Image (spheres, rainbow, N blue to C red):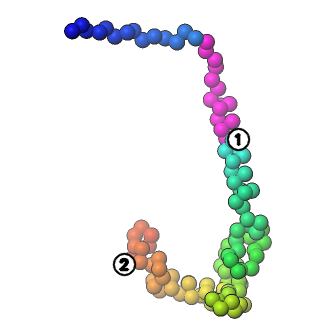
Amino acid sequence: MTRRTRQPIRHWTGAERGFDIIFEGVIATVIVIILVIGATVIFGSADAGLSYPGGPKSATGEAFSARYWSTSPMTDDQGNVDPNGGAMDFVATVVTELDGSSGTAGYGPPYNETQ
């Protein structure tokens, strides 16, 4: 058996060109911004996505808040609209959260502390 000798490391002898990482970063950032704006246009909602099916339309840019929830009318399974339904739903949710009987109350640490 003959032993093979390792070939010495060959260095690149071709042409070299400069690399500008700042330029590459700017190009990548511009591409990401264009993709985000495109996704916003395609998947965005005209009313800022703050309404729920059957609920009142919210003003563009209005945050989903306790006021929006409590002043929204609710529609039941039979299609009847209750103008105070949002307030009743808000109160019922707050009470179950505060007394610890909501669906999320039993998650335990680190989501909530039980003593």
**Mark 2 surroundings within 10 Å by alpha-carbon count, few (fewer than 14), some (14 through 19), many (20 or more):** few
Front one among 27 and 3: 3
Q: Residue at x 68, y 30 (%)?
A: 23
Q: Is residue 42 above or below residue 70?
A: above
Q: Residue at x 67, y 44 (%)?
A: 32
Q: Residue 29's spot in the image, x, y percent?
A: 67, 41
Q: Is residue 74 above or below residue 16?
A: below
Residue 92, visible in the rendered structure: yes
Front one among 7 and 2: 2
Residue 84, visible in the rendered structure: no
Q: Which residue is mark 2?
A: 115
Mark 1 or 2, which is nearer the eye? 1
Front one among 94 and 26: 26
Q: Residue 98's spot in the image, x, y percent?
A: 50, 83
Where, by quadrant of the figure, is residue 18 drawn? top right
The magenta segment is 15-30
Q: Residue at x 68, y 76 (%)?
A: 52
Asked which secondary structure carries label 1, the reply is helix
Q: Amino acid at mark 1?
A: Val
Q: Is residue 3 above or below residue 114?
A: above
Where, by quadrant of the figure, is residue 48 drawn? bottom right
Asked which secondary structure carries label 2, the reply is loop
Marks 1 and 2, the one that precedes in the sequence: 1
Q: Residue 91's spot in the image, x, y percent?
A: 59, 87
State left or right for residue 3 relative to residue 50. left
Q: Main secondary structure of the magenta part?
A: helix
Q: Amino acid at mark 2?
A: Gln
Q: Residue at x 45, y 83 (%)?
A: 100
Q: Which residue is mark 1?
A: 30
Front one among 66 and 58: 58
**Mark 1 surroundings within 10 Å by alpha-carbon count, few (fewer than 14), some (14 through 19), many (20 or more):** few
